[in-house]
Amino acid sequence: MFKAIRELFTRESLLEQAMVDVDGMLEKVEAMVSAAVPVLRQSEGTEVQIDIEAMDAAVNRFEEDVRRKVFTHLSLMGGEKVYPGLVLISIIVDVERAGDYAKNILTLSQQHPAPLRIPALDEEVSQIEEAIVGRVIPEGRRIFIDNDEEGAKALIRDYRGLSKRCEAITHALAAGEHAGSVSPSTLVCMALYARFLKRILSHWLNLMTALANPFDRIGVKTDLGPR
């Protein structure tokens, strides 16, 4: 499905430009997440090596540019060109939202300037971080750019269950399982952090469903075989 869309893009300059913009969005959001997570979890301060606010603004501009280019293209071409344009407009929402959650993580680090740690959860949280930051985001970007349909299916199968691990952390903290071991502020911030990681994961895997599924099933991560 997406191969045919990509072939249409390469023949049409506006849509080709839009695809370049989407890659720019992916690159910036990957950098934002990779920079925000260590600040929250490892740093004693809130200084980050990149300007996340500027990057977030750039991602938003990319989103507007993609919408404008696709709309202009569809206005001129119409017909068979409608379908790929709709797909592209659908997926950029997920990329932009992942960037927003990266910014939320940085904001959380400002509210909790000490490294965010709960000893009983550290190993689990670190594993989730490594999966999302080290695997899902960079591999997902490569898969999308390479139009790797089978790779997209495999990434979804391998990591869709990670959401439940994020939920388990939030539920445990809400149930008071770690109350008394750390400050209330740390409990709240960790619960929010687990939620933010879950949403970044979900939005990035939604991007993969654009390669793995037809348009009406973009965002659906089931029926792709066992995990």
Image (cartoon, rainbow, N blue to C red):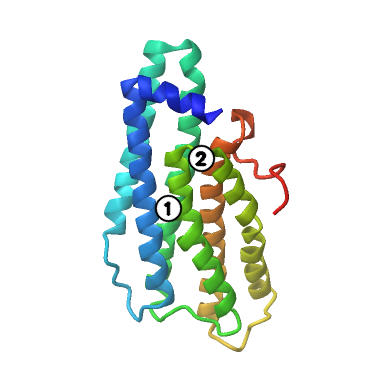
Q: Quadrant of residue 168?
A: bottom right
Residue at x 50% of width, y 34% of height: 90
Residue that numbered label 1 is attached to: 100
Residue at x 63% of width, y 84% of height: 179
* Closer-to-camera residue (217/67): 217
Disc 1 and disc 2 in contact, CB within 8 angstroms: no
Label 1 environment density (alpha carbons within 10 Å; few <14, some 14–19, many ≥20): many
Residue at x 52% of width, y 30% of height: 2
Evaluate whether residue 20 shows in this view.
yes
Image location of residue 186, percent across then percent down: 51, 79
Image location of residue 10, percent across then percent down: 37, 24
Circle 2: residue type: Asp
Up the image or down, 142 lies above or below 176; here it is above
Up the image or down, 84 lies above or below 39; here it is above
Query: For the residue labelled by badge 1, is the local secondary structure a helix, a strand or a loop?
Result: helix
User: Rounded to the nearest whole Å, what is the CA distance between mark 1 and mark 2?
Assistant: 26 Å
* Closer-to-camera residue (173/227): 227
* Closer-to-camera residue (80/55): 80
Up the image or down, 102 lies above or below 27; here it is below
Side of 9 where 180 appears, left or right: right
Q: Which mark is residue 30?
A: none
Query: For the residue labelled by badge 2, is the local secondary structure a helix, a strand or a loop?
Result: loop
Q: Quadrant of residue 190?
A: bottom right
Q: Which mark is residue 148?
A: 2
Side of 139 where 221 appears, left or right: right
Image location of residue 58, percent across then percent down: 29, 45
Label 2 environment density (alpha carbons within 10 Å; few <14, some 14–19, many ≥20): some
Single out the mark in the foreground, 1 or 2: 2
